[in-house]
Amino acid sequence: MTHHSSQEISASRFKATCLELMKNVHDQRFEVIITKRGRPIAKLVPYDDDAPPAIYGFMAGTGVVAGDIVSAMDETWSAESE
């Protein structure tokens, strides 16, 4: 997702204007970098429903183990007979 603009604010100002800031970030599609003592500590960005799933772990919990996957098979593989 490409953001049109960004702005930096202090943590204390963020705390005082959090709800208004979240609405503006959503409506105007920009990001806010929150600083503490002048150093960036967090970023507030608009939520993106159309974001692609994460590459790692997106299929976690979707696999099913069917049967015994530990014991040897009774079948001979063609690679074993050559």
Image: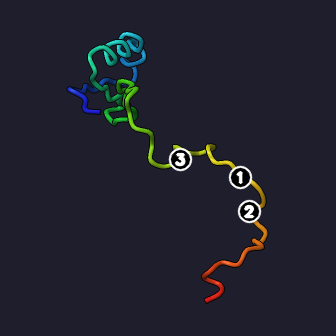
Q: Position of residue 28 (x, y in %)?
A: 26, 16
Contact, mark 1 vs mark 2 (Cβ under 8 Å): yes
Figure check: 17 above or below 34: above
The answer to which quarter of the image holds residue 24 is: top left
CA–CA distance in space, label 3 to label 1: 18 Å
- Viewer-nearest residue: 7 or 27: 27
CA–CA distance in space, label 1 to label 2: 8 Å
Q: Give the residue furthest to the top.
A: 20
Residue 75 shows which numbered tag? none
Q: Amino acid at mark 2?
A: Ile
Residue shown at 31% from the left, 33% from the top:
38
Mark 1: secondary structure: loop
Mark 3 surroundings within 10 Å by alpha-carbon count, few (fewer than 14), some (14 through 19), many (20 or more): few
Task: Quickly name the residue at label 1.
Answer: 65
Q: Amino acid at mark 3?
A: Gly
Task: Quickly name the residue at label 2.
Answer: 69
Mark 1 surroundings within 10 Å by alpha-carbon count, few (fewer than 14), some (14 through 19), many (20 or more): few
Mark 2: secondary structure: loop
Mark 2 surroundings within 10 Å by alpha-carbon count, few (fewer than 14), some (14 through 19), many (20 or more): few
Left or right: where does residue 29 sit relative to residue 58? left
Q: Earlier in the sequence, mark 2 or mark 3?
A: 3
Task: Quickly name the residue at label 3.
Answer: 57
